[in-house]
Every structure is written in C-alpha cells, then in structure tokens.
Image (spheres, helix red, strand yellow):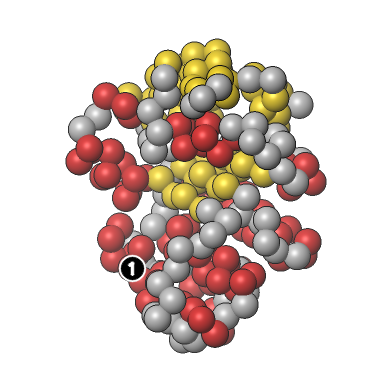
Amino acid sequence: MPKTLLHATNIAHSFDYELFSNIDFTLKEQQSIAIVGRSGSGKSTLMHIFSSFIKPNEGSVTLLEKDVYALSEEKVEELRRNDLGIIFQAHYLFKGMTALMNVEIATLLSNQNIDNELLERLEIKELMHQKIGELSGGQQQRVSIARVLSKKPKIIFADEPTGNLDKETAKLVMDVLLEYIKKENAGLILVTHDEEMAQLCDKSFKLEQQALKEM
C-alpha cells in the first residue's frame, strides 16, 4: 500500500479576494499530480501552501506525517532541506559557479552523492565544468533540476518547470521527473498551464472558480 506523502484538508486562502476554498488533496508515493489553471487562478499559491511556504487562512497540511504549520521554523527548514524538492521556472543558480559546483551544494547539504546517471539522463554530464553564464536557458533549467533531484527529495513541487523549454526538452525533463518518483518512492506535484505536460501525470486537476476539480 503506497504511503501518503501529502494530505491537505479544507484549504482556503485569499488576498484582496478569495482565491479558493474547501480544497482537499492527497499525494501518495510514486504518484504524479498536475494542477492546471489560467494565470491568476491561484495555482502557484496553492503549491506554496502545500510546500510549507504560505500558511493558508484555513485548513491543514500534513507533509510526511507532520502537521507542517504546527512545526517550529527549525523543523520546517529541516523538512525543506532533506525531503522537499522545489523546481521553479526561474532556476536560481549561482551564476559565477560551474554547473558541477551548483549541484554539489545540494548534495553536500543533504549528505548525498552526485548521481552521474541522472546527469547523463538529463544530457548535461558534458556541461558540468562550464560556468552557469555560459549555458543556454534550457541547459540551466536542466542543471537546476539535477540540483533538486540530487538531494533525493521525497516530494517534488515543480512550478512551470518546462515553461521555457522546447517541446523535446520539456518531454525529456518530464520523463526524468516521472522516472525519479518511481525509482525513489517519491511524489510529484506539477503546476503548469501546458495541458499536454499535465496529461503525462497520473492525475490532473483544474483550479477554477475557487475550486480544485479533477479533470
């Protein structure tokens, strides 16, 4: 029986207006779930709530059997460092360093080794001694994904990870993410506006009219 990695109950949140309410959501081991919705629908905010970065106005989020918004800041940092992998469309790499140094930082912080097979699979092994500034946007994004996966997270939160990539590279990235969660008994939440990428996941939900509905 696959373990539950994330369980959110009765989530509601608003800024100047209500974004969404009454959202229940569960992610299990080896499961991939896409959340789609138009720009401004609140899908990135929902992902930030699920991943410990924004406390919802209402509801609870349990990550790896821990009530995340009841934890101390220190415990949340530990959870983020060891068990959560966050992939953004903007990759936040250290520009003055080589690709290898960027990946090494993640492995050192999490006591893991660099996975050469992963670098080969992402087609970036030959680029590892180049500075980040010398790489194309697509190459930088793949280095950023290698950095996240190298720390062996249990849950990957990916916010538009293929948004700046051509179709072929986007498909490669999705294949790598889906292979990773099967191999490592992890889970993936993908936030995207690309319904083609969403269809590669086990389940897809649409965030519209303040509600999350399975597609």
Snapshot quadrant of residue 37: top right
Residue 205 at least partly seen: no
Q: Residue at x 51, y 53 (%)?
A: 87
Disc 1, SS:
helix
Relative to 1, say whether 48 is above or below.
below
Quarter the C terminus occupies? top right
Going by the numbered disc 1, the residue's amino acid type is Ile
Q: How many marks?
A: 1
Snapshot quadrant of residue 92: bottom left
Looking at the image, residue 112 sits to the left or right of residue 92; the answer is left
Q: Residue at x 57, y 76 (%)?
A: 124
Q: Nearer the viewer, residue 59 or 63?
A: 59
Looking at the image, residue 198 sits to the left or right of residue 46; the answer is right
Q: Residue at x 32, y 50 (%)?
A: 81
Relative to 37, say whether 126 is above or below.
below
Looking at the image, residue 61 sits to the left or right of residue 213; the answer is left
Residue 55 location (% of width, % of height): 38, 28
Q: How many residues crowd mark 1 within 10 Å: few (<14), some (14–19), many (20+)? A: some
Residue 200 location (% of width, % of height): 73, 44
Q: Nearer the viewer, residue 179 or 134?
A: 134
Residue 46 at least partly seen: yes
Q: Residue at x 40, y 33 (%)?
A: 54
Looking at the image, residue 38 sits to the left or right of residue 140; the answer is right
Q: Residue furthest front?
A: 16
Residue 53 location (% of width, % of height): 39, 38
Q: Nearer the viewer, residue 198 or 179?
A: 198
Residue 101 location (% of width, % of height): 37, 77
The residue pinned by badge 1 equals 105
